[in-house]
Amino acid sequence: MIFEATGARKPLDQAFELVSERGRVMMMSQVHGGDAPQYDNNLMQKGATLIGGYINSKPFALKRADLTIKGEWPPVMGDNLVRYVNSDTWTSDEDIRVILNLIKFGSLNITPLISHRFEFEDISKAYDMVWNLDPNLLGGVIRWKK
């Protein structure tokens, strides 16, 4: 799986070139302007999947709802609903779990994406950099406790 989160056209085109057969490209940001990405040969011919990562485009989580017959009709929902996990179910909840596990187990190194570290007292500096689209800010970490 390739995660593309820059919002720029060239890395998205590269992701389409690099994805393996029947692989997935997770588009975490939106590319604005320009022509549509050239996905016909680099994505379709490989049988690869493009997944849009816009948070509201899919359910956050699904819960398995088992019916329980308790001697009455109609049946009622079971008391212990569990997370529904299936290969054809991709929810925002699962996206978050996958990313956090990739980071946790060292498969995804996000250290190069952290350009700034902020103490919580300096949070206004972080917001100013975001608001002013500071090109030096790639990613920031806020330390909430000392």
Image (cartoon, rainbow, N blue to C red):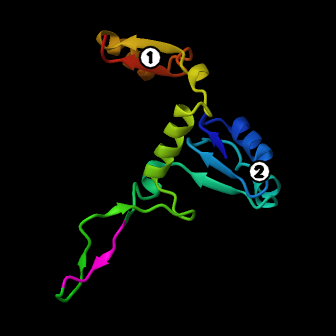
Q: Position of residue 123 (x, y in %)?
A: 33, 15
Relative side of 130 to 6, left or right: left
Is 67 contained in the magenta span?
yes
In the image, residue 69 lies at what x, y percent? 24, 83
Vertical position of residue 14 compared to residue 82: above or below: above
Name the residue located 78 percent from the left edge and 50 percent from the top edge: 20
Q: Of helix, strand and loop, which one carries label 2?
A: loop
The residue furthest front is 71
Q: Position of residue 118 (x, y in %)?
A: 40, 12
Mark 1 lies on residue: 129
Magenta stretch contains residue 16: no
Spot occupied by residue 68 in the image (x, y as percentages of width and height): 27, 79
Side of 39 where 5 appears, left or right: left
Question: What is the C-alpha distance between the residues marked 1 and 2?
Answer: 33 Å
Mark 2 burial class by Cα count in 10 Å: few <14, some 14-19, many 20+:
few
As helix, strand or loop, the secondary structure at mark 1 comes to: helix
Residue in the image at 52% along x and 32% along y: 104
Q: Which of pointers 1 and 2 lies earlier in the amino acid sequence?
A: 2
Do the residues under discs 1 and 2 have CB atoms within 8 angstroms? Answer: no
Name the amino acid, label 1. Met
Would residue 38 be found to the left or right of residue 74 on screen?
right
Q: Which residue is mark 2?
A: 38
| Residue at image coords 33%, 74% | 66
Q: Is residue 81 above or below residue 126?
A: below
Within 10 Å of disc 1 (Cα), the crowding (few <14, some 14-19, many 20+) is: few
Q: Which residue is pictured at 54% across the width and 32% down the height?
A: 103
Give 98 or 121, whichever is nearer the viewer.
98
Viewer-proximal residue, 101 or 4?
A: 101
- Figure check: 27 above or below 104: below
Quarter of the figure with the C terminus: top left
Q: Which residues are magenta?
A: 64-70
